[in-house]
Amino acid sequence: MERVPALDEPLKKSLGPATAKVMAEALDLHTVGDLLHHYPRRYAERGELTTLADLPLDEHVTVVAQVADARVHTFNGSKGRGQRLEVTITDGSGRLQLVFFGKGVHKPHHDLLPGTRAMFAGKVSLFNRRLQLAHPSYELLRGDSEEAVDVWAGALIPIYPATTKLESWKIAKAVDAVLPSAVDAVDPLPDALREGRGLAELPDALRLIHRPRTKADIATARERLKWDEAFVLQVALARRRHADTQLPAVARRPAPDGILDAFDAKLPFTLTEGQQKVSKEIFDDLATEHPMHRLLQGEVGSGKTMVALRAMLAVVGSGGQAAMLAPTEVLAQQHHRSVTEMMGELAEGGMLGGAERATKVVLLTGSMGTAARRQALLDLVTGEAGLVIGTHALIEDKVRFHDLGLVVVDEQHRFGVEQRDALRGKGKQPPHLLVMTATPIPRTVAMTVFGDLETSVLDQLPAGRSPIASHVVPAADKPHFLARAWERVREEVGKGHQAYVVCPRIGDEEDQKKKSRPSAADEAEKRPPLAVLDVAEKLGAGPLAGLRIAVLHGRMHPDDKDDVMRRFAAGELDVLVATTVIEVGVNVPNATAMVIMDADRFGVSQLHQLRGRVGRGSAPGLCLLVSEMPEATPARQRLGAVAATLDGFELSRIDLEQRREGDVLGQAQSGVRSSLRVLTVIDDEEVIAAAREEATALVLSDPDLTAHPGLRTALDALLDKDREEYLEKG
């Protein structure tokens, strides 16, 4: 029988079934290797106590502190039937109370004498306005016995990500039991790469990260383990890119004097340098005989749709068809409307008055009537329609194309393997792919999350675009600021312009009061978010009385939504009170002001997206971020950051720093058993960029990794067996 590699050994064999069960359920750790890769979150120093001053409420924490005093209180009569032990611990930065009840009093009363130092773990709760740990677990730090001296002699105490059922020191003891197996760890890094970059060997790195003697040990271990994570991930992405280059595709070169030239000739403006550069990158890709896979990221209003439309027309001009996939029906309808307007008679193929080189542009969504849908499907299968714009309805079995050459995916950071494969199957050969996003993504995230796509960036705004002034309106501290905000809206309308008011919620939800469970953090958090229907009513009867106000939200009938948007675009309405349905794609150059209510309830990139709806014409834009949150809160600081810069890439960085790493990678890492542990996509830009270069070179010379069995093993561990294509999910 073949021997199981040491790191694949099930934990129940080395730790016993009970501990192994808790490890599997609480931390998703199943093998010796899983546990060795469960690294300490931080390290407590014997001489330096962790801070009690910064304890988070409702979180499970581990602290190292000293007992200041301990008292037993007796209640329920003189017989002492009820006892409560209150222990106060301190670490120099703050004090914390520990409470033990009933039979659980005796042992801690004996152990926790004043002056004793220990590690305590438990959930932080609030009682009588004071933080406390009820019935915490603890481990004394006394070097009484030889064994204890050995265990705690190391200057640094690892604090592991722990849970209620499994304290940090129990994890540490389990790690001690399996650490000798680290010598059998198979190294995923090629020797030449490891030696060339002066990185520690893997067994040493594992030993140093778990049991460091000095801070330098931790740094050495982390540098090596970061490389493992970055390199293995980048190899997976490089293999995906390499596999894509092996697929066949039809080269699509725009016909001279075709529909693209006719379109360019009627443009009333010249393309920006950025648009020209990105168009060239796309056209070069389209001209090759393997499928383009490109991510186009551009600031709100940088003209991505124009670039995508020209790429689609290039494909139509070469005899193929192009499909644009939008995430929502509202957006699909808006794209359809703006594309047909931009193309004019070129979108009237086969119709009276249509231009000679024209094509047909069809819309396909789930809510279309049967007759319109049947006609659209017919136009696609015959090739009558060169362009189709739709939602995921495009992917259904019934949809057949005459010759699908290009798929453009808008604002859907990823769409899954199944969908991409379904669309691929609709072309005679795999179509070219262009993914667009208006949420700027820092370079390293693009390299990590979208690493299988080549990236183009549009960071220049078209001429004639005006700057947007942004201000935070502290509604609770300074109510007169809010009154002034409504005056500003009236002033803009007085100049012939229009305004948006954005709210987080619609307002026709049943029983909203019961559903929204207030957090005790703040008054502003207690009430439900402001709603479109309520705000519209109050504005109409109050500060904006007499103005033409309408509402827009996702639960309206598609025809009603369309009607409101058409009237707003035509200038028949002054103020549109809406949810975030206006976040992408809405283009009304005459709208100059936006007031975002409860702005703290939106994310940084969402606020940036929303703000991009104003200042789209020649008049300057104004965006007011209304919040009731107090000045010192993180939510208010986030709003301050948005008000301070219009640079989406800078904001995406701020956003990333404020969110946990896992959120960033989101589902792009679904199917991955072990996501990033020591690598952080914001701080480790150089490591990721270098790992990408090394990975690309290695895969080019050895696509099947025949010469790198250790790397092959690490890839298998990283990627779910059933779906190595996890990189396309999300």
Image (cartoon, rainbow, N blue to C red):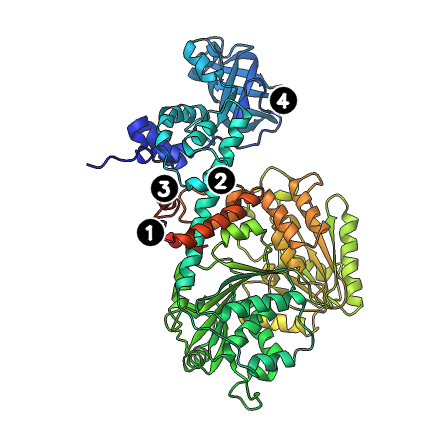
* Labels 2, 4: front one: 2
User: In the rendered image, which residue does mark 4 sit on?
Assistant: 94
Label 3 and label 4: CA atoms lie apart by 48 Å
Which residue is pictured at 38% across the width and 30% down the height? Answer: 182
Residue at 51 percent across and 17 percent down: it is: 118
Residue at 57% over, 32% down: 56
Q: Do the residues bearing badges 2 and 4 touch, measured as CB atoms within 8 Å? A: no
Would you call the spot at circle 2 few (<14 residues within 10 Å), some (14-19), or many (20 or more)? few
Q: Which labelled disc corresponds to residue 196?
A: 2
Is residue 477 in view from this perspective? yes
**Which residue is disc 3 drawn over?**
710
x and y percentages locating residue 65 in the rendered image: 56, 18
Q: Which residue is drawn at 63% across and 53% down?
A: 649
**Would residue 108 appear left or right of 438 to someone viewing this image?**
left
Amino acid type at circle 4 is Gly
Task: Kindly identify the amino acid type of the residue bearing the numbered disc 3.
Answer: Gly
Residue under label 1: 722
Assess whether mark 2 and mark 3 are in contact (beta carbons under 8 angstroms).
no
In this view of the protein, which residue sits in the foreground, 498 or 81? 498
* 51 on left or right of 161: right
